Amino acid sequence: MADAVLFEFLHTEMVAELWAHDPDPGPGGQNMNLSVLESVGFRVGQALGERLPREMLAFREELDVLKFLCKDLWLAIFQKQMDSLRTNHQGTYVLQDNSFPLLLPMAAGLQYLEEAPKFLAFTCGLLRGALCTLGIESVVTASVAALPGCKFQVVIQNS
């Protein structure tokens, strides 16, 4: 329990620090801040992708890797599993969390909906980094329709 609180505090402080210098950056500044958060998340995801699946056998398919992310990786980070995983069987996956822990503090009002992307960039990078370490190149985006729920869309890049 204490680990989750510490992680949430660290994440909140990373976001706050990036936006502290310019609380209302223009589009270019905001994209740069989101890119920094995504890059940090990518590196963390790479490290977790190396450490967590040690006891797992080699993943046979992309779907097995995504199931690992939804169950084991999410459990290791947020102490809960992802709520749903959907796919079109053509390289696009939608991971849904109906009560995303990093969005819970702002779930009280709709006025925070526009602030949500800065709290999702790190996690997009984390998912992309873990997938990269497990041999899957991807693009990960996030969307929020109603707080505290969110969806992560993973599009596998065919090489």
Image: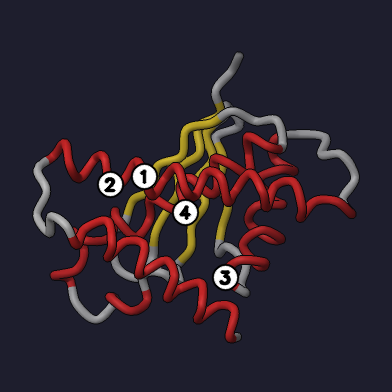
The residue positioned farthest toward the top in the image shown: 159
Task: Report x, y in % for residue 107.
Answer: 29, 76
Q: In terms of sequence position, does the residue under pointer 1 or pointer 4 come before the other?
A: 1
* Residue visible at 36% across and 69% down in the picture: 12
The correct choice, above or below, for 6 with respect to 94 in the image is below
Q: Identify residue for label 3.
A: 78
Q: CA distance from mark 4 to mark 2?
A: 14 Å
User: Where's the N terminus, which quadrant?
Assistant: bottom right
Task: Report x, y in % for residue 16.
Answer: 27, 65
Q: In terms of sequence position, does the residue under pointer 3 or pointer 1 come before the other?
A: 1
The correct choice, above or below, for 93 with respect to 76 in the image is above
**Taking the image as drawn, is residue 99 in sight?**
no
The answer to whether residue 71 is left or right of residue 85 is: right
The three-letter amino acid code for the residue at tag 2 is Asn
Q: CA distance from mark 3 to mark 2?
A: 23 Å
Q: In terms of sequence position, does the residue under pointer 3 or pointer 4 come before the other?
A: 3
Q: In terms of sequence position, does the residue under pointer 4 or pointer 2 come before the other?
A: 2
* Residue visible at 28% across and 75% down in the picture: 106
The residue positioned farthest toward the bottom in the image shown: 1
The three-letter amino acid code for the residue at tag 1 is Val
What is the crowding at mark 1: few (fewer than 14 residues within 10 Å), some, or many (at least 20)? some
